[in-house]
Image (cartoon, rainbow, N blue to C red):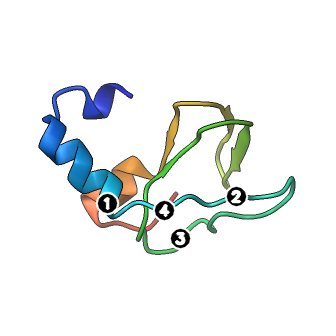
Amino acid sequence: MEFFSRATVEELFLLAAISCEVQLKAGDGIFMEGEIADALYIIVEGKVELAGSTFKEVLGPHDAVGLYAVLADEPRY
C-alpha cells in the first residue's frame, strides 16, 4: 500500500503489533455510513462493496477502507 511506503521497519512492526485480522463472509457488514471511524481496514483477499447515499464502489486486495475517516477523526461517508 502506497500510504505505508515511507514507514520505517520499526513503524511497520508497531502497526503489525496493534493490528488484527477480521474474516468476513459474503454479505457481512463492516460499518455503516455516519459511524465514527475507529479502525482502518486493508483488504487482503476478496472484494468489498462500499455503498453510501451518493456512491457505490468495489475494492479488492491491497485497497484500504476507512483511511480518511480514521485520519480526519470524522464519521464515515
Closest to the observer, 25 or 71: 25
Instruction: Identify the secondary structure beneath mark 1.
Output: helix
Q: Is residue 53 above or below residue 10?
A: below
Q: How far apart are the two marked residues, 3 and 1, measured between alpha carbons?
A: 28 Å
N-terminal of the pair, mark 2 or mark 3, is 2
Relative to 40, say whether 60 is above or below: above
Direction from residue 45 to residue 26 in the image, left or right: right
**Distance between the alpha carbons at the discs numbered 2 and 3:** 23 Å
Quadrant location of the N terminus in the rendered image: top left
Image marks 1 and 2: residues in contact by CB distance under 8 Å: no
Calculate the distance from the C-alpha at mark 2 to the C-alpha at mark 4: 10 Å
From the image, tell me which residue sits under label 2: 23
Q: Secondary structure at mark 3?
A: loop
Q: Residues within 10 Å of mark 2 (few under 14, many from 20)?
A: few
Mark earlier in primary sequence (1, 2): 1
Q: Which circle marks residue 36 in the picture?
A: none
Q: Residue at x 24, y 26 (%)?
A: 5
Q: Measure the C-alpha gap from mark 4 to mark 1.
A: 8 Å
Of circles 2 and 3, the one toward us is 2
> Which residue is denoted by mark 1 in the rendering?
17
Report which residue position mark 3 lands on: 34
Residue type, numbered disc 2: Gln
Q: Quadrant of residue 7?
A: top left
Amino acid type at image mark 1? Ala
Give the mark nearer the N terminus: 4 vs 3: 4
Q: Which residue is mark 4?
A: 20
Question: Residue at point 52% right, 31% down?
Answer: 62
- The crowd level at tag 1 (other Cα within 10 Å; few <14, some 14-19, many 20+) is few
Residue extending furthest toward the right: 26
Residue at horizontal 40 percent and vertical 60 percent from the top: 19
Q: The residue under label 4 is which amino acid type? A: Cys
